[in-house]
Amino acid sequence: MAREAGTRGVDVITLDPRVNASVTACGPRRRALCLGMGLWAVLTPQQKVALLGHELGHFAGGDTRHGAVVGSALHTLLLWVVVLTPERWDGRLVHLLVVGLLRIPYHAARGALTVLDKVSLRGQPEREYLADDLAADVASAEAARDLMETLLHAERIEGELRRLSNEATAFAGRDGAPRMDETLWPRLADHLAAVPADERARLLRTGESERHRQDATHPPTRLRLERLERLDRRGPSAAKVVLDGRTATAVEGELRPAARRVARSVARDL
């Protein structure tokens, strides 16, 4: 994937339950890819190629928010904000002094993060469009467009993830209770696959699709879809990378142990 995207691969892959994916630089030489299993589990093989093409496209396109300098700075400042966030005072004088002392570096780190975040966001929509173009080039415009359509269902997927989490909590310890580590991600994929075609079409037509965006750093999904549809109308494009059945099985086998750990954490954390 990285070779076709014109960049190098990542050094670390992490998994979490989100309906999202991201890349970041961890220092001058290390790159990390975070796969949200809430999204990865519901994608078709070729949509997964498009997702990876988009994320690696940030490195290939010179996106400074994911580069060694700015990306590392954003990552480090965010860690400092998390570490330095003052805890609630527990009534002890010593604790009050510690909390008071932490407020100074906490606000300094948070202020620096806010400024750097706003400055680095300039031109971000165009960088997202360029990453979408690279996803279409590597996986095919059709696969990239299908990925965008799946993102329109993010709220539905998140709602089902919460429902399954509550179900696991309610039946925890009972005989016949579902094994979250084995069933969570397949059930999430089955839920999305069961959405009727007319409902999918309705979501594409409604104003809701125009308001939806992956997060604050991404342009509206509707606009991204329109751009990819224009590419697709030029004629079918051959994918440079095809995730065949054998490779897909190998990938899921490699991810399975970590995916199970994430599934077990869902009932506790959501």
Image: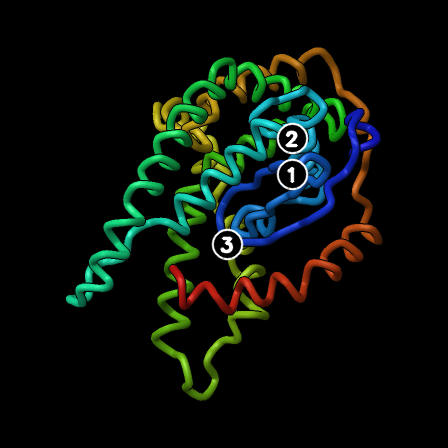
Q: Quadrant of residue 114?
A: top left
Number of numbered markers: 3
Near-viewer residue (175 or 14): 14
Mark 1 is on which residue type? Gly
Does 190 sit left or right of 144 as displayed? left
Q: Colour scheme in the image?
A: rainbow
Q: Residues within 10 Å of mark 2 (few under 14, many from 20)?
A: some
Tag 2 secondary structure: loop
Q: Which residue is mark 1?
A: 27
Q: Residue at x 50, y 38 (%)?
A: 197
Mark 2 and mark 1 residues within 8 Å of each other at the beta carbon? yes
Of callouts 3 and 2, the N-terminal one? 3
Q: Which residue is mark 2?
A: 68
| Distance (Cα) linking label 3 and label 1 | 25 Å
Residue 30 horizontal/vertical position (percent):
70, 41
Q: Residue at x 22, y 58 (%)?
A: 88
Mark 3 is on which residue type? Pro
Q: Which residue is mark 3?
A: 17
Q: Nearer the viewer, mark 3 or mark 2?
A: 2
Tag 1 secondary structure: loop
Image quarter where the C terminus lies is bottom left
**Residue found at the very far bottom of the displayed protein:** 175
| Distance (Cα) linking label 2 and label 1 | 6 Å
